[in-house]
Amino acid sequence: MGLRRLKNEISFLGLDLGVHIPRRKRGSSGSAITKHSISMMECATILIAFSNSVTHVLPSAYLPLRTTNTKPITERKPRKKRCKQTPFPTTPDMPAAMRDRIGEMGAYQIQLAIQKQLQDTDMNKNHGRLSFPAKKLKVDFATEEERRVLKQQENGGKKGMNVMIVDPLLRESSICLKLWKIGSGDSYCLMTQWNSLVEQNGFKSGDHVQLWSFRKDEFEAETQTMVSRLCFAMVKLDATTASA
């Protein structure tokens, strides 16, 4: 490859070397003189000029490529909104239908234990419980003997006590009452059959409910005596009960 051709190809790549390649004189016939080679001095001058020029200029084809971040971007899952706590405007009395229902059982000491809004934790099937702090109760429904039983340990956990509960549809069922240490204080928990109670009554997070306690006498075969049994009644509050 001739030096002039080399220079033309370098110029095509965008390099201005500022190198002068002397032209050979043409003969009288006008044809280029190609049989003579250039001198060593001319060759050295061209190579030095070429070396000095390419140190600061690089074709775009030789520029280093930018590395792209190939780390996969993980999308953040949107946080599930917690149920906003909104107090019920009133504290209604027990509905007449519920009072008549438990009255048929011989209920006495009918008291409102707590009025609360169901939270996400109450609806969590894995937890399977309705909890209410003891310090938020309007009345302490448990006797000293019942509290002693609830504080006993059984199979590595707190011993529970089966109690009867009447749901908003006036149906009787059995549920387990336990006393747990949650946070800095004691909390009562209704469990074991709580998930079934939620499904049957269509409870959902945000609903307002009342839990009433009452007692009824039952004959205990073991002691051959009449004993006072703790029971509960649950009422679901809505717009129709707000003005009651």
Image (cartoon, rainbow, N blue to C red):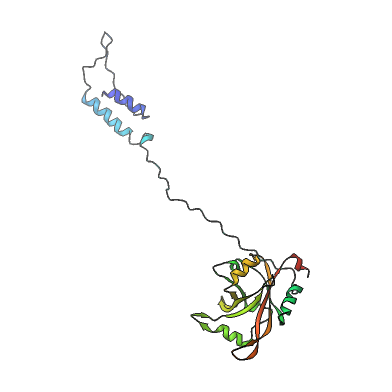
The answer to which of 166 and 214 lies nearer the viewer is: 166
Compared with residue 67, is residue 117 higher up or lower down, i.e. above or below?
Answer: below
Position of the N terminus, as image quadrant, is top left
In the picture provided, is 186 more to the left or to the right than 67? Answer: right
The answer to which of 205 and 56 lies nearer the viewer is: 205
Image location of residue 62, percent across then percent down: 35, 36
Q: Quadrant of residue 166?
A: bottom right
Image location of residue 85, percent across then percent down: 66, 66
In the picture provided, is 20 more to the left or to the right than 138? Answer: left
The answer to which of 211 and 86 lies nearer the viewer is: 211
Please tell me which residue is depicted at 75% across the width and 70% down the height of the picture: 90
Q: Quadrant of residue 185?
A: bottom right
Position of the C terminus, as image quadrant, is bottom right
Q: In this view, which residue lies farthest toward the right?
A: 243
Q: Quadrant of residue 152?
A: bottom right
User: Is there any visible trace of residue 239 in the rendered image?
Assistant: yes
Image location of residue 235, percent across then percent down: 70, 71
Please tell me which residue is depicted at 58% across the width and 86% down the height of the picture: 148
The answer to which of 117 and 61 lies nearer the viewer is: 117
Compared with residue 111, is residue 235 higher up or lower down, i.e. above or below?
Answer: above
User: Is there any visible trace of residue 95 in the rendered image?
Assistant: no
Q: How many marks?
A: 0
Compared with residue 168, is residue 7 higher up or lower down, i.e. above or below?
Answer: above
Q: In this view, which residue lies farthest toward the top?
A: 29
